[in-house]
Structures are given as C-alpha cells and as structure tokens.
Amino acid sequence: MPVRRAAGAAVVVGVVVLAVLGLLRAAAPQGSPSIPEQVQAVAAGLRCPTCQGQSVADSASVLAASARQVIEDQLREGRTPDQVRQYFVDRYGEQVLLSPDASGAGLLAWLLPALAVAAGGVFAWRWLHRARSAPAEPAEDAVGGAARRALAAHRAGALVPDDSPAGESLREALDARLAAAEDDPADAEAVAGADRRLAAAVRRYRARETSARVRAPGAVLPRRVVTAGAAVVLLAAAGVGVGLAVGDRGTGDPVTGDVPGAADPAAGVAALRAEAEARPQDPAAWLALGRALDRARQVDPAVEAYDRALALEPAADDVALLRGNVLVRAGRGAEALPAMRELAGRYPDDPDVLLVLGLAQEAAGAHEAIDTLSRFLELAPNSPAAPGVRALLGDR
Amino acid sequence: MTTPTGVSSEPAPRRRRWPAVLVFVTVVALVGGLFAARLGGDSPASTSALIGQPAPPLAGETLDGSRFDLADWRGEVVLVNLWASWCEPCRREHPLLTSTAASLGPRGLRIVGVDVRDDPDDARAFLAEFGGARWPTVTDPEGTHAVAWGTFALPETYLVGRDGTVVAKTIGEVDADWITEQVVPLLGVDAP
C-alpha cells in the first residue's frame, strides 16, 4: 500500500510539475519580439472594434486594419504593449480587451477557473482517499488491538461469523489465531501474522456487513459504477465524434488513411446491419453500414454494403469513391478500376479521386498510375497520403 | 447474536451533500452573472469610454487641401462626423447633417467630417452629390483618427462641448431626435 500511495503521489507531483513547466514556458517572453510580432500579440488581445453586428456593406470592418496600424505606429514610437492596450481601453472601454482585466469583476473571471480546478482536485483527492483509507492497512498496534478485540468478542459470543465467504474466512482466521497462541505463545511472529490475518478478515467481514446494508460513500460498488459510467460516457463521446467525423466526410475530404478507431467497431456494425436490414431501401443506412464495416476492416461485407447503397442511389459519387478506396486498401484495386476511371472522367481535378484511381491503376499494373499519382501530388502535396505516394513513385 | 457490535464497527460518517450542492450552484450563478453582465453591458450604442473625457486631437489635411485642427475650435460646440463615401448609411444620414448645419449653424454649431479610409476623389464626388462641402473634412486614409476616437463602425458622430470634452456619441446614422436631445441644449437660447 505505501508503495502504491507513493506511486500515486509521484504521478500527481509529476503532472503538476509538467503543468507548471508548460505554463511557464507558454507565458515566458520569447526573447525580444519584433515589432510585427508585438503588433500581432497586442492585436490578438483586442476585440475587433467593428464587429458590432452590422453587415459588411454597412460597417467598416476596415477599421480592424486601422486598429492594427495604430498598434504598429504606437509600438514604433516606443510605447509598451500595455500602454497600447490602455490606449484602446481609454477609447473603446474595458470590453475591447478579449481577456478581462485582472481587477474588479474581471479578477473573478481569472480566479474562478483556478478555484474550480483546485476545488475539483481537493474533492477528487478526498473522495479517492476516503475510499482507499477505509481498507488501508492499519498500524501494527491497531492490528493487534483489532485482532484482540475480535478475539474477545468471539469468545464473548458477540462475533459469530455467518456463512458468507467473508464469514468463512473470518472463522478460519479466528481458528488460526487461537492455534498460533496455543502452539507457542512465545512465537511472536506467528501470532503477529495471525493477528494481521484476523484483522483483515474482520475488516472484510465488516465491509460485507456495511456494503450489504448501506452503500457508504466511496465504498467499492459506487466507485466501480462511477468508473464504468465514466468509461461508457467517454466511449459514447468517442463514438459520436468518430461518427460525426465520418458523417461529415464528403468527396472533398481525404478518404485514405485510417479513421481514428472507435473502441469496438463490431458492436456498431451489428446495430447498423440491423438498421440497414430494417430499412433496405434506405441508401444512407447501407452507406453507414459500409463505413462501419470499412472501419472494422471487413472488406468484402463493406464492398457489399456500398454496392447496396450504390444500387439504390447510383449517382452517389462519394459512395463510389469510398468503395474504390476500400478495394484499393484491400489490395483489390483492379476491381475498383472501371468505376474510378468513370469518376475521374467527371472529377479530373479531385485529388481524392486521383489518389484512389492512381492506386487502383497501380494495383492493376496499369502504366498510367505514375501520371495519375503525380497529378495527385501536384494537387494535394500536403495530403496525409502524399508521403506514401511519393515513396511508391520513388520505388518505380 | 450475529451482530458484530463487538468489533466496534465505527460507521463511516455520512457526508451531507448539500454544502457541495450549494457551493456548486453559487459558483454557477456567479459565473453566469458575470457573463451576463459582460455580454449585456456590451452595447456601446450610446456610451463611449470617451464621454466626459477631453476630445482626442484631430488635426490634418482636409479634402480641399487646407489644414484643420480641432483645437482651433475650442469654445465651440462641434459635431465630429466620421464617414466614408463607400458607406451606405453615411449617404443616408448626410441630408440630415446638411439641414442641421443650415438650421443650427447660425446658433453656433460647427461640424467637421473625418473621411475614413477613403479615396479623396470618391469623397469629393460624394460631397458634390449633396451640393458641395459645407464644412471641412479631414482625411483619414489609414483610419487612425477613427481609432483614436474609439470608432466602432461608420458612420459615427461625436458631440464635443465648449470645454473640449466629448459630451455624446451616436453610432450609425444621426437621427433628428439625437440632435434635438443632445446638440440643441448645448447651444443655448441666445439665437433663434
């Protein structure tokens, strides 16, 4: 236990030290910044004075440029950033500052997050500490005392273990303690060991009683429930996030590369398959199923689901692209070739189409692959897939 | 006889939750109040940090090539009108300014324009549409005068009192009520 506590303390200290170092580094002045950097820094802290809800035609958003000009002029005249900020506050009022002034009501805005973090930390520490201190190993004296009290209570008939597992082990511990004392009262080590065992058994026995009657705050069950609940919430959030990311992905977005993995794609797949089969005429349901299968790397079923979606909605070019993409990744690029050629005919400048087409051509051994992939690199030199494509082209 | 009273089971003290709930609710209310105050108090339509303060300096070249300095008008009631030819509301408010100049000019009102981030030729054409310039207009090609006056958007009009402090400000088109309520009282009743 002390080792675990020490490790926990070390982790906490480490996190705090890292956080403080990060803050210091972030807040540290970066040498002596140039005037443009200072202008940028001051301007970033000031609210755009013209964004008051007027339309672009009616308002003078160019005044933001004027504000930057004023900042630069004043910095060049040798004023400090704080003086420049004050110049704007004098004219536009306190609300021109994006971060509230650290005084008056503004101070509250600065302090509250820190207070909230501190309060949260204290709360979490007490909660964890309470939960842990209950079963913590008592000091040696207390062990002996608890064991002696239990023994006395047992002899007085006040402590009769029931038939539960905890009661069973308590009974055994009582017997062992009595045996240790009878065997050789001088063997203090054996008695102490039996004491420890008895104290632990009593504690477990008592915990059985309390957890059966009232769930003490911080007792085992609620904590487990909270942990499981948090895990479920996190997983759900991750699932929704992935779902949104995938749902938002149109033909204009990169389709290659892995979608950040959900925790268990199989579970989602089953639900989506049920959904698609319940609504067999809904291309969106088949598309969703195909994407889930795609993520779960079940290539054949994914292609099948995409085919169903395409059969219902032949003009869905994004589905065709996804289908080509999954085929290429599965090493079946040649199958994707006709559809991808057709797509590329209509979207000759879409880098994603070109990428999948090029990979399909490459898989089919077609010599146009080099041209297609080179064009992809021209159009999307910074695509996440670009390094891989460059390597591929370099090999040939 | 199965009660383990002999084992001196000290019951875990049941912690009362309501103080924590109270603290939570208070914090949420405070934060909400703070945001509400900040957001709600954000309407600068009639307020300006400059009101009650000395008017910022306003000196520079005018559209007709002469020089203007607001300090020369110390002791007068002055309307400082920030505008630009590309600004549609400025066009809409201009007739009212012209008639105000005509009616209140004899009672001592002075008007000076500040042409913000504009092409001088466009600005002159704009004034010509309304029958020519009736008051000086300082050019402000970089908009720095506008910023010095705390301008949010064009048009804006500031009222400077005889003591050289900013008395009032209006964002957007000047309207007749503002002239009546803010400008006329400063002029006194010495003239019809």
Image (cartoon, grey):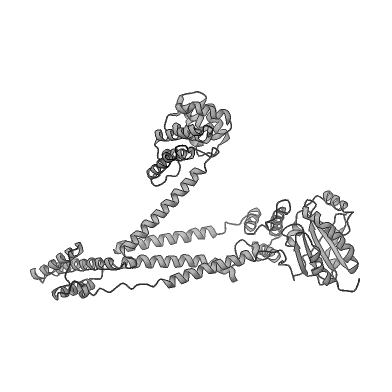
- Image: A85 above or below A57: below
Query: Relative to A127, does residue A149 appear above or below in the rendering?
Result: below
Residue farthest to the left?
A183
- Does B17 sit left or right of A162 as displayed? right
- Residue A60 to residue B179: above or below: above
Across and down, in percent, residue A168 comes to 17, 63
Image coordinates of residue A334 in percent, x first then y, are 45, 26
Residue at image x 47%, y 49%?
Answer: A241
Q: Quadrant of the N terminus of chain A?
A: bottom left
Relative to the observer, which residue lies in front, A103 or B82? B82
Closest to the observer: A311 or B156? A311
Q: Quadrant of residue A122?
A: bottom left
Residue A239 pos. (x, y %): 44, 48
Residue B54 horizontal side relative to residue A334, left or right: right
Q: Quadrant of residue B55?
A: bottom right
**Tag count:** 0
Tell me if residue B132 can be seen.
Answer: yes
> Image point 31% across, 72% down: which residue?
B12
Decide if residue A80 is in sight here.
no
Give how far across and how far down residue A45 sits, in percent: 62, 59
Instruction: Answer with left or right where residue A294 lies relative to residue A219.
Output: right
**A366 vs B132, nearest the viewer:** B132
Relative to A339, is B50 above or below? below
Indicate left or right for A14 with A43 as reference.
left
